[in-house]
Image (tube, helix red, strand yellow):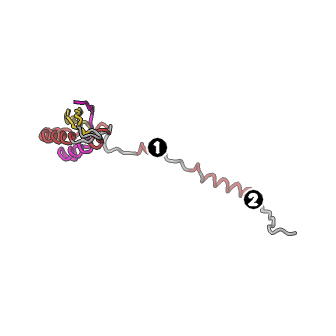
C-alpha cells in the first residue's frame, strides 16, 4: 500500500554544508563586540568638574513652630534648628554672597515664614522635600535663578519647647 508521504533522499555536498556553517559562525555572535560601560564612560564629556561647585552658608535658624496634634485642637510647639546652604558654581560664589548681603533681611524673613507654616505631614518627611522645594523656589527668586543650583538643609533638629 503506497503511503501518502513518500520518502525522498536528499544528498548534501559536505564541502558546501561546511562552508555555510563557517560563514554563519563568522557573521554571528562573535563578529562584533558588545559596547562596554567603561568605553562609554571614557567617551563622556563633563560640563563642569565635581569641585566646580561650592556650598555658601545662608544662615543658621532656630524657628518655633506650632504643630497641630492629630485628632485634637491643641497645638504642640516645637523648635526646628537647622543650617541652610546654597550650592552654586564656584565662579558665582562672590556674586551670591553680595546679593545675600543686600537681601539678608527679606531672605531670612521668607525662610521663617515658610518654616513656620510647615504641616505635620511635611515634618514627618525625613528629607523635608516639600519644605526644601519651597525654600529653593524662594531662594532662587530672591538671590537669582542662575546663582542657586539647590539648597542643602543640615542638622535638622526638632525639639519640644
- Tag 1 residue: 37
Q: Is residue 89 visible?
A: no
Which marked residue is nearer to the observer: mark 2 or mark 1? 1
The image quadrant where one finds the N terminus is: bottom right
Q: CA distance from mark 2 to mark 1?
A: 45 Å
Q: Secondary structure at mark 2?
A: loop
Query: Would you place residue 123 above or below residue 13 in this image?
Result: above
Seen at 31% across and 38% down, the residue is: 124
Depth check, front residue: 38 or 120: 120
Query: Would you place residue 54 above or below residue 44 in this image?
Result: above
Check if residue 100 falls in the magenta segment: no
Check if residue 139 falls in the magenta segment: yes
> Callout 1: few (<14), some (14-19), or many (20+) C-alpha neighbours within 10 Å?
few
Q: Is residue 55 left or right of residue 21?
A: left
Residue 57 placed where, x, y %? 21, 34
Seen at 20% across and 45% down, the residue is: 138
Q: Is residue 113 left or right of residue 50?
A: left
- Tag 2 residue: 13
> Callout 2: few (<14), some (14-19), or many (20+) C-alpha neighbours within 10 Å?
few
Seen at 27% across and 40% down, the residue is: 72
**Residue contact at pointers 2 and 1, CB within 8 angstroms:** no
Residues shaded magenta: 133-161
The image quadrant where one finds the C terminus is: top left
Seen at 53% across and 47% down, the residue is: 33
Amino acid at each position: 500500500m503506497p503511503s501518502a508521504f513518500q520518502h525522498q533522499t536528499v544528498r548534501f555536498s559536505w564541502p558546501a554544508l561546511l562552508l555555510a556553517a563557517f560563514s554563519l559562525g563568522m557573521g554571528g555572535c562573535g563578529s562584533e563586540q558588545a559596547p562596554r560601560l567603561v568605553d562609554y564612560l571614557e567617551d563622556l564629556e563633563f560640563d563642569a568638574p565635581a569641585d566646580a561647585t561650592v556650598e555658601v552658608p545662608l544662615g543658621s535658624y532656630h524657628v518655633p513652630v506650632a504643630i497641630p496634634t492629630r485628632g485634637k485642637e491643641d497645638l504642640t510647639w516645637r523648635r526646628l534648628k537647622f543650617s541652610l546652604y546654597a550650592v552654586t558654581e564656584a565662579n558665582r560664589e562672590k556674586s551670591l554672597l553680595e546679593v545675600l548681603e543686600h537681601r539678608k533681611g527679606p531672605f531670612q524673613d521668607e525662610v521663617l515664614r515658610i518654616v513656620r507654616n510647615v504641616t505635620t505631614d511635611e515634618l514627618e518627611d525625613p528629607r523635608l522635600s516639600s519644605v526644601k522645594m519651597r525654600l529653593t523656589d524662594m531662594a532662587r527668586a530672591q538671590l537669582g535663578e542662575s546663582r542657586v543650583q539647590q539648597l542643602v538643609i543640615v542638622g535638622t533638629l526638632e525639639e519640644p519647647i
